Amino acid sequence: MDISIVITYLLFLTIWIVPICEREFRNNAHLMWAYWFVIFLHQAVAFTNAYLFPTISGANDAHGFHTKAIEIAQSENFGFSIGGLFYRNMLGVVYWIFGPSLMLGQQLSILAFSISCVVLVKILCQLELSRYKVVILLAFGALPTMVFLGSITLRESYQVVFFMLTVYFGLKMHLAGCINRSFLFMIMSAVLMGIFHQALSVYAFLLVVLFMLWSYRPASRLWRVKKMRLLATLAIPVLMLGVVNFTAVDRPLAGFVTGDVELLERVAWYRDVATVSRASYGISLDLSSPFMTIYSTFLMYIHYLFAPFPWQISKVLDVYALIESFSRLVLICFALKNWRNAYGAQRRLLGLMLILFFSVTFLWALGTTNYGQAIRHHMMSWWIILILGIPPLMEKLKRFRSGHGAQTHGLISQDITQLKK
């Protein structure tokens, strides 16, 4: 039997039993079934794309990554670079060892997604939001974008899982109140996240700095470490920045990292030369004055979060994008309300999660010129806004049902009383 088939079967079985190793899943049958349900959806898309017909995006970038990886495996011309080239070489190494197989490449993507499901539940436990984990897991894993793009040979699944791992270990470090081994795991996760996309390599540096500066407790031991240890800790992000500089030579963000080219000028140039399509925003970054810079940046961000708008709908995909954008708007409103009503340590943690959401979405907004592209990029932040927005939304729906039920019961009782009279 072909070794690639054996490895594919082993990965397939591993994906189904991943949560059995976690107590949160073993002790909650509903959570386990929710996990199996979303994995079934992903596997159905992977099977369809591999053996029946190309699914959504399966014939575009995903097919390109797969074919390029086969060429790399056959030529044995491996290399290292940040972004799509790294992902192609990673798949190429796998195909070189086990043999080229589209289903094998897709199982690796689903495995990354399955790990992100486990990490999501663990983050919910850290934030003391475990009571909503079934609903949040379903909303995270069953999102059509996540199902169709997270189960094929695209790098989004890897970006999401390493972003979540960075946040998980960062929160774990702060909950402990000191710099511990979780700090090292956070650094490793951030580096791995950055390897898969050049923009994320810069964001990884900023993310590490954010977690180092954001203390969970006002009197945390994080600030009472020895000076030499603190200097060594601060040197880590600098080394990360050096790695980005070394591996991003002649890449679009290399100038920003080295300081040779201003970031805003690079963004303005990229948006001007981007391909114009039906889904394009048509918004350039206007650097003619400080006011126009702020105004055009604001328009870029609003369009990234909420486009397409109702007057832009012309196809079925536009309807789906509108529904997703409206859901995001509702969740943002509830997330802000949740943070405003929180207090103490919980308020600080929710504030940190909001900063993560708005920072990563702003990063993608700078380089996203159409809402078709934005749908893929929103996969990175979807889990954060679910964590922040679902709990207060569920509480609101619960109060609404309770109030509606009590009102209905009162009307029925009143009708019965009148009949008796």
Image: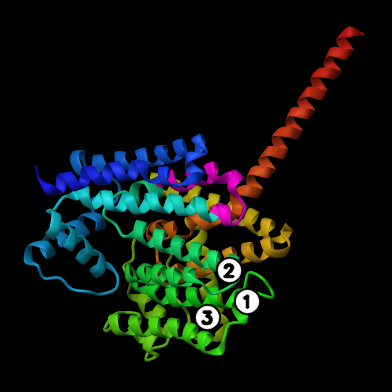
Classify residue 36 as left or right of residue 120. left
Mark 2, residue position: 174
Residue 369 in view, yes or no: yes
Q: What residue range appears in magenta? A: 124-144
Please state which of residues 273 and 157 is positioned toward the viewer in this rendering.
Answer: 157
Q: Is residue 202 above or below residue 90?
A: below
What amino acid is labelled 1 in the image? Arg
Which residue is found at the position 26% from the left and 47% from the top?
A: 11
Percent x, y of residue 419:
86, 9
In the rendered image of this protein, does residue 47 appear above or below residue 259? above
Q: Nearer the viewer, mark 1 or mark 2?
A: 1
The amino acid type found where label 3 is placed reads: Thr
Outermost residue toward the top in this view = 420
State the predominant SS element of the stretch in magenta. helix
Which element carries disc 2, helix, strand or loop?
Answer: helix
Any part of residue 310 in sight: no
Residue 353 in the image, given as x and y percentages of width and height = 57, 63
- How far apart are the alpha carbons under marks 1 and 2? 10 Å
Q: Residues within 10 Å of mark 2 (few under 14, many from 20)?
A: many
Residue assigned mark 1: 221
State left or right for residue 152 relative to residue 76: right
Q: Could you tell me if the residues under marks 2 and 3 are in contact, i.e. CB atoms within 8 Å?
A: no
Mark 1 or 3, closer to the camera: 1
Identify the element where label 1 is drawn.
helix
- For label 1, the crowd category at 10 Å Cα-Cα, with few meaning under 14, some 14 to 19 and many 20 or more, is some
User: Within the magenta stretch, is there residue 19?
Assistant: no
* Spatial CA span between label 1 and label 3: 41 Å
Instruction: Report how far apart the C-alphas of labels 2 and 3 lie in the structure.
Output: 36 Å
Of badges 2 and 3, the one in the foreground is: 2
